[in-house]
Amino acid sequence: MIRLDAVRVTLDGTEILHGVDLMVEAGSWVTIIGPNGAGKSTLLRAVGGLLPFDGSVTLEGTPLARLRRRERARLVATVPQTPVVPPGMSVLDYVLLGRTPFIPALGRESARDLAAAAAVLDRLDLGGFAGRALDTLSGGERQRAFLARALAQEATILLLDEPTSALDIGHQQEVLDLVDELRRDHGLTVLATMHDLSIAGEYAERLVLLSAGRVAAAGPPREVLTESLLADHYHARVRVIDSPDGPLIVPLRARPS
């Protein structure tokens, strides 16, 4: 579904990604982890066609460079870490932006578009906010609205950049459970970035540890979330506790000398 071969990204004269290779199988959930500045968001933006790159990105067997903008939008939906919030726009109108790839030029939303937006709002517990201005919502409510727009797009690939960073633990679980349900029921392919390593290991089938713009490790969570790898690349003191749902990462405080 998603394949990267020797992908390099240079921004302002600095190479951020150094020849990244990555394979994400159709219908799977892969999460990219790594310390700040590792290039996680840059990688997602390259996959979404939002940054120039060297190398090759292939989506469903088609090189990204050959996809027209509307074709790409029907294939890939992105939830960026800091989306632009149009001032005064209602939640419903914002979510309807996800239907743009299906609306003819100079056309209007169809009944199907409105129904798709309403269904997504209800699933994310946002139905009561449809008429509210997006910029009046709390951080967590806005984060759910950002995800709702992406889901309304009905793309087969979902790119999530820190999708739960503004959510309390209850809404984190609701959003991630919904994404996982959609993935399993509709064959959605998920490529995400996350800082919370325990949550990343619980939901993703595979983790990719990115460090200094290179893939340092990749595989099932139990193979990537090890004390030695986290010490080497995060410079962190942690204890990894195995659990039925995946590794739990416990930070360890420094002991007085």
Image (cartoon, helix red, strand yellow):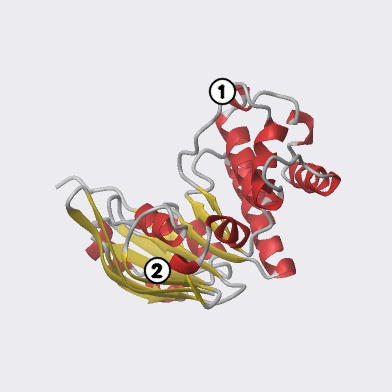
Category of crowding for the residue at label 2, using alpha-carbon neighbours closer than 10 angstroms: few (below 14), some (14–19), many (at least 20): many
Which residue occupies the foreground of this view, 132 or 38?
132
Q: In this view, does 151 lie above or below 228?
A: above
Q: Residue at left 64%, top 26%?
A: 89
Q: In this view, does 235 lie to the left or right of 4?
A: left
Q: In this view, does 24 lie to the left or right of 240?
A: right
Determine the residue positioned at 61% across, 46% down: 147
* Of labels 2 and 1, the one closer to you: 1
Q: Position of residue 138 (x, y in %)?
A: 59, 27
Nearer to us in this view, 68 or 40 = 68
Rendered location of residue 181, percent (x, y): 71, 62
| Helix, strand or loop for disc 1 | loop
Q: Which residue is drawn at 44% across and 69% down?
A: 207
Q: Read off the residue under disc 1.
A: 87
What is the three-letter code of the residue carrying label 1?
Pro
Residue 220, position in %: x, y? 47, 76
Identify residue for label 2: 208
Element at label 2: strand
